């Protein structure tokens, strides 16, 4: 039976320059590989060691990138190793098979959202009406599935985020603050549901996962084993579970450690 490895990308496996956390002396900094270019500028990185480990992982597991990014944002990432057969985008709203959306999966997801949650338009209207233009830089909708704001974090009122989360809870939505982005996501729109579908299709009997944000908690809980880095929303609240390992590493070195743990676990499954 294959081992399935489902990993969040941003601030878990790949890192922007602002998230690298290179706190060591410059001469001891790890060599970096750029894995994403946007508008002709380098955007995201892994260590070269992590890149090699990820390439090795393809020989022992079914690797599934699992991200809240839209399909367009995901497809500009150039991960090392063979192109993954499966990828999960839009927090589970799109299941890509060889880079193409599985239409049946997407239709099933959208039908469930219509049945169980307040409509996206209601959430959009609330964000537009209550978010202060002083700290909001952009209002965005992703794949007609969820909404997010790009904010000036130092000006953001934390109390507003708590009030938004309480308002969203009663409407079947959840809120996550990640860096400069505030996400409002329907509760049934989960990475874990899409990962279970990939496990069913591949016949995987062991699922490994990693993630750093509250939107990754369901993914980690659905896995047989999981890892979270020493940074991010989950670390900030000391979130854990019996099958979850909380790593001390922060930044891009946490990404390297996570891939190393994946590889170790696939070679000696628990």
Image: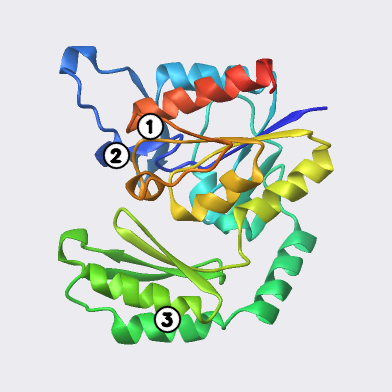
Residue lying furthest front:
242
Q: Which residue is mark 2?
A: 19
Q: Secondary structure at mark 1?
A: strand
Q: Which residue is mark 1?
A: 45
- The front one of 164 and 238 is 238
Q: Quadrant of residue 93?
A: bottom right
Q: CA distance from mark 2 to mark 1?
A: 10 Å
Disc sitting over residue 78 in the figure = none
Disc sitting over residue 167 in the figure = 3
Task: Provide residue 103's location: percent of width, then percent of height.
Answer: 76, 61
Disc on the earlier residue, 3 or 1: 1
**261 in relation to 43, above or below:** above
Disc on the earlier residue, 2 or 3: 2
Q: Do labels 2 and 1 touch, CB within 8 Å?
A: no
Task: Provide residue 192's location: percent of width, then percent of height.
Answer: 64, 51
- How was this image coloured? rainbow
Please state which of the two labelled residues, at mark 2 or mark 3, is closer to the viewer: 3
Task: Provide residue 184's location: percent of width, then percent of height.
Answer: 45, 69
Q: Do labels 2 and 3 touch, CB within 8 Å?
A: no
Crowd around label 3: few <14 · some 14–19 · many ≥20 (10 Å): some
Q: Do labels 3 and 1 touch, CB within 8 Å?
A: no
User: What residue lies at 84% left-to-right and 37% top-to-bottom?
Assistant: 203
Q: CA distance from mark 2 to mark 3?
A: 30 Å
Q: Quadrant of the C terminus?
A: top right
Q: Quadrant of residue 114?
A: bottom right
Disc on the earlier residue, 2 or 1: 2
Count of all numbered marks drawn on residues in the image: 3
């Amino acid at each position: 039976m294959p081992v399935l490895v489902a990993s969040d990308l941003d601030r878990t496996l790949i890192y922007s320059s602002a998230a690298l956390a290179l706190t060591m002396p410059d001469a001891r900094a790890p060599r970096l590989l750029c894995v994403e270019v946007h508008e002709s500028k380098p955007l995201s990185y892994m260590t070269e060691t992590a890149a090699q480990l990820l390439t090795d992982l393809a020989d022992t597991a079914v690797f599934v990138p699992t991200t809240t990014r839209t399909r367009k944002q995901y497809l500009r990432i150039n991960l090392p190793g063979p192109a993954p057969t499966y990828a999960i985008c839009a927090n589970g709203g799109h299941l890509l098979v060889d880079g193409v959306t599985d239409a049946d999966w997407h239709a099933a997801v959208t039908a469930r959202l219509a049945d169980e949650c307040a409509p996206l338009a209601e959430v959009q209207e609330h964000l537009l009406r209550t978010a202060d233009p002083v700290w909001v830089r952009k209002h965005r909708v992703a794949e007609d599935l969820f909404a997010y704001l790009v904010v000036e974090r130092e000006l953001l009122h934390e109390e507003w985020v708590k009030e938004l989360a309480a308002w969203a809870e009663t409407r079947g939505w959840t809120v996550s603050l990640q860096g400069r982005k505030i996400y409002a996501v329907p509760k049934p729109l989960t990475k874990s549901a899409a990962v279970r579908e990939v496990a069913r299709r591949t016949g995987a009997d062991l699922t490994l996962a990693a993630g750093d944000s509250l939107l990754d908690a369901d993914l980690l809980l659905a896995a047989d084993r999981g890892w979270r880095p020493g940074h991010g929303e989950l670390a900030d609240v000391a979130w854990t579970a019996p099958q979850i390992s909380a790593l001390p590493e922060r930044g891009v070195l946490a990404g390297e450690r996570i891939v190393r743990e994946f590889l170790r676990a696939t070679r000696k499954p628990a």
